[in-house]
Image (cartoon, grey):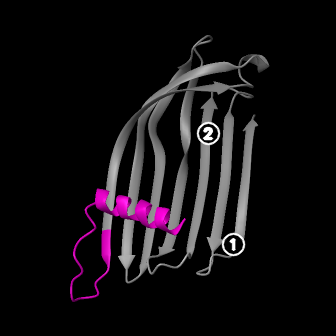
């Protein structure tokens, strides 16, 4: 597991140009990437169309903000993604829907060879339709904390899907 974690972190750092030879100063390394990614996806809204369900073809942009900080033996990764102008039409009724919400990820780990890390993921994914009874609401909260000796000290995984 340690080798995989080190490989994954190294791959992420290399992809952002953060792996560089060590310098004599102990300055923190910070890098932020801010981008817009076009998305096209089809989502089933089971409570729409009087409970018969509808498939909604959505398109628009996903705004993604990614940040990496390395300070000493600690790496912190964070990301946030949210739809911008994401909308679509139901493929049978023509009802209009809007994509909203935000997804956030925060990860902190030790780079000194220990197993210490903390990971938090919160996702609020919403497809909002016209009128009542056709909104898809997805929520997930996930958190895990592992001590330097590998002990799991916190674990939360709450997931819900509502159609209102």
| Residue 101 percent coordinates (x, y) | 56, 45
Q: Residue at x 54, y 19 (%)?
A: 89
Identify the residue shown where x is 73% and y is 54%: 158
Q: Is residue 130 left or right of residue 35?
A: right
Q: For the magenta stretch, what is the residue range?
A: 1-30
Mark 2 neighbour class, 10 Å CA radius: few under 14, some 14 to 19, many 20 or more: many
Q: Is residue 156 above or below residue 97?
A: below
Q: Going from the N terminus, do you reach mark 2 or mark 1 first?
A: 2
The percent position of residue 26, horizontal first and vertical second, equals 29, 87
| Residue 152, numbered label | 1
Residue 28 position by quadrant: bottom left
Magenta stretch: includes residue 23: yes
Q: Secondary structure at mark 2?
A: strand
Q: Quadrant of the C terminus?
A: top right
Is residue 130 at least partly visible in the picture? no
- Which numbered circle lies on residue 36? none
Q: Which residue was labeled with disc 2?
A: 126
* Residue positioned most to the top: 92
Q: CA gap, disc 2 to disc 1?
A: 32 Å
User: Vertically, is 8 above or below 73?
Assistant: above
The residue shown at (56%, 75%) is 115
Q: Nearer the viewer, mark 2 or mark 1?
A: 1
Q: Residue at x 22, y 76 (%)?
A: 21
Res. 123 in view: yes
Q: Secondary structure at mark 1?
A: strand
């Amino acid at each position: 597991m340690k080798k995989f974690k080190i490989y994954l972190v190294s791959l992420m750092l290399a992809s952002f140009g953060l792996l560089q030879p060590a310098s004599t100063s102990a300055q923190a390394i910070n890098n932020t990437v801010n981008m817009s990614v076009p998305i096209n996806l089809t989502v089933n809204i089971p409570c729409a169309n009087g409970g018969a369900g509808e498939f909604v073809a959505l398109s628009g942009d996903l705004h993604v903000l990614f940040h990496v900080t390395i300070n000493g033996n600690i790496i912190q990764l964070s990301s946030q993604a949210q739809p911008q102008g994401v909308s679509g039409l139901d493929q049978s009724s023509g009802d209009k829907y809007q994509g909203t919400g935000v997804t956030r990820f925060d990860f902190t780990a030790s780079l000194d060879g220990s197993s210490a890390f903390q990971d938090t993921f919160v996702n609020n994914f919403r497809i909002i339709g016209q009128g009542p009874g056709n909104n898809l609401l997805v929520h997930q909260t996930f958190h895990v904390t592992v001590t330097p000796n590998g002990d799991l000290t916190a674990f939360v995984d709450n997931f819900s899907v509502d159609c209102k």
